Image (tube, coloured by chain):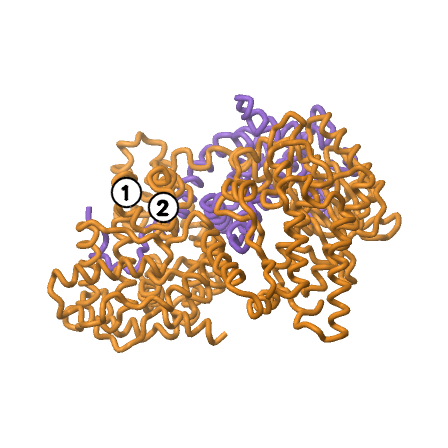
Amino acid sequence: MMSVSASSVTQLLFDWQQGDESALKKLTPLIYDELRRIAHRYVQHERNGHTLQTTALVHEAYVRLAGQEKPEWQNRAHFFAVTAQVMRHILIDHARRRRYLKHGGEFRQVSIEEASLMSEERARDLIALDEALDELKNFDPRKSKVVELRYFGGLSLEETAEALEISVMTVRRDWRAAKAWLFRRMNMEQSLEFKLQLATPKHEQPEG
Amino acid sequence: MTPERWQRVEEVLQSALDRPRADRAAFLNEACAGDDELERETNSLVEAYDEARDFFEESAIAQDALVIINSDAQMHPGREIGPYQIIKHIGSGGMGEVYLARDPRLDRLVALKVIRAWLVSDDALLRRFQAEARVASALNHANILTVYEIGQDGEIFFIATEYIDGLTIRERIRAADLTLKDVLEIAGQLLSGLEAAHAAGIIHRDIKPENVIQRHDGVVKILDFGIAKLLEKPSPETTSTTSPIIRTETGVGVMLGTIGYMSPEQVRGLPVDERTDIWSCGVVLYEMLATQRPFDGKTNADTLVTMLEREPEPLFGTRAQTPAELRQIQLVIDKALCKEPAERYQTAAEMRTSLEKIKTELEANKQTGAVAISTQTKVKELRSLAAQTSTSGFRRAIVMTMAALLITVMFAAAFVYRRYRASTIPPVVAPRSYLQMSEAERLAFVEAQEQRISNMMGDRPVKLNNEALRVIKARVDRYAARRNSTSLKPDEENLRDVYARAPEYVPVIARAFAARKIPIVVAVYLPMIESAYRPCYENEIGAKGLFQFLPGTAQRYGVSRAEMCDVNKMAPAAAHYIADRMAELGDDAQSMTLVLLSYNRGENSVRDSLRQLRETDANYERNFWTLFANRSKLDQTFQKESAWYVPQFFAAAIVGENPDAFDLQMPALSSFARDMSEKR
């Protein structure tokens, strides 16, 4: 299936890093397939009662794609970055479509696709996270990147550090600050939603 | 936040987080040294950090693995699978996705069905699929979709077939423009395709409107030949769903089909032959004529029982008054739908011949102008034509049709039904001023009206206990008091002012709901007018009021931040927002209460709570009061919310539907929705 050779994957990663956006376009379908494979293996392992670190799977994916047992860290870092980005894109895209999905209609049939859809709650959280990350990027781009790599890219602290060429300690600190800020940002929206009541002047809300 | 400001905030935050939890507050107080704003900011971040705990500690890959696995619908255009170049996604099947693709070798378009590798991990299954697909590809008939190639590209299996630019029979049924001639044509070609397949020893086993497509030039093609057999083994992902695809383990193998179209022997898992396809053709023929399936139930199980045990309601009847051609069609359907295969048409050719004969007769009649029915008669008119000439048999069919509509969970049907009920049920109590009633009279009024409202909403009326009655009455009393400007509380609006907006807003609400085929419940009119469109006022976080949602949400519904106080912009957006949420809850929630609870608490938690309720009352979804009555069984927040919302809705509906009793010189709110639909 792979119509792009391993060496050209490395080249594409390099080109992308150099700012060639068309390289990303060519990479995306490949990464996409890898992500699905990763997800699939993750689920299989889980079913068998094992938990597998996604980070190990992302690794394997890279080795398979770039065809190197001991890949140069730079390529690997690029790969991680693009994987995280594609993953974020896929999920947000899915969440958006989920939110607009219209149910109902005659003879509605529940398909396999629908059955494994994201929950509405999850879709809302993801969209909120996406927006919050964009906002964070405006005043602290590195933290936004850290979250993208760790959360969407499935990387460990160490690998995130490697990918961003910063120390593990810095990743750790970035992560906790970002987590506090994002959690508050997302919650602000949700707690507001929670407070809103239907035609309820404050004094008429349920007692107790 | 500026980068500089954030740098300062983060510095303090990090130092605070480095300290033991107990010391943090004191540290912040000291570190911020009088900078209140900084202290507030860092304090809330520290709190957020504590609350966040394992918030996104598990990677998205792990959390959304299933979503990722199933997301190949987004396969990128331009991507190559085998020799084919994907152009776009055109549909989803049970097993995979269908793409429009180009074959550069022949420069022709193909439909590429891509099968998910993990669904065919069983080698034996895959071999069988390939063997069968090969047989299907050997079939060469004008009414069977031509299979070009079966192939594999890495983990992806694909089938390339001719690309048909046309409409499926499902789409044609929905469009409601089929003529009698169309129906006879389609059925004839369908049978002719099956004839060829059966001759080659192939049984389709999944004939249904979705699997038959009509090209724009009228040629009918049967899709998915033999592929159904691929779908034999349920994948782990699908075992827990309520899919219409049924899988039955049997001695002769695994069966698959679609409930509603499968023959009795197929459902029972008995060996099947070509006569199972005859049955399915009978179902499709019936559905094209009636625009509803002969066997349909509230649940899959109901449908199965109906199919196995009952005869379908006659379409046209066989009485003498019914036009001869319709009687003949009825006979064809009856014969195709015999429970016992031996009593059906034994071959597709036999059934086709019968239909052709009818067609010829109709065409001859047309020339002599003998009857009111011709091949050009629209299917939707057939039944009224039959009704003119037929007797109670047909009328009974209509009544039964209504009943069938009522018991289905189809939104559209419920919508029509509810509106119908709303327009015909007279008030139980002659309108007189609520304000002049005694306490006992008020209770009686509330009780009678509650029954009426429940009826209007299609809910099962419930005998309320005194507690519920009193709660509801208290809410109605509050509404009544709002007729008097001097007794208004600070946040309240005079009811008359709220009502004044009804002609403008009720149609907007009703339309938003109708667009999504959601039954509108009269109980929502008043609360929605009242809260959704309350003039905007800003607080420290932003706009206030339920439907003056957050800037981000509003934006998604096409309202910019600047427009959030513009009632005319917000009104439709709010209605659509609520309607979307209701649509998302789908069959599980027909009541506004549930929507609001889910709105506040997230769909999943609501579902969990409702699962508990289901054990108490199978009709819980449609019954506000079940929610109220069972609230002690629910968790605390849910308890409070249901205790508040349920009576509130009923109170609003009682006031909204009895404006005279509250001295509001206005028609009932539901009448605005009705006027809207009549105008259309």
Check residue B12 in the rendering and tell me which mark sits there, or answer none: none
Residue that numbered label 1 is attached to: B630
In this rendering, the count of numbered labels is 2
Q: Nearer the viewer, residue A29 or B403?
A: B403
Whether residue A178 is situated above or below residue B473 in the rendered picture: above
Q: Earlier in the sequence, mark 1 or mark 2?
A: 2
Query: Amino acid under label 2?
Result: Tyr
User: Which residue appears at 42% of the width and 58% of the height?
Assistant: B578
The reply to whether callout 1 and callout 2 are in contact (CB within 8 Å) is yes
Whether residue B418 is situated above or below residue B280 in the rendered picture: below
Q: Where residue A143 appears, x then y in whole percent?
A: 49, 41
Residues behind callouts 1 and 2 on a single chain: yes
Q: Farthest left residue?
A: B438
Q: Where residue A58 appears, x then y in whole percent?
A: 62, 31
Q: Farthest front residue?
A: B320
Q: Farthest right residue?
A: B106
Looking at the colours in the rendered structure, which chain would you say is drawn in purple? A
Looking at the colours in the rendered structure, which chain would you say is drawn in orange? B
Q: Where residue B587 appears, x then y in whole percent?
A: 46, 49
Q: Nearer the viewer, residue B550 or B442?
A: B442
Residue A50 occupies quadrant: top right
Distance Cα–Cα, label 1 vs label 2: 10 Å
Label 1 resides on the chain identified as: B
Residue that numbered label 2 is attached to: B620
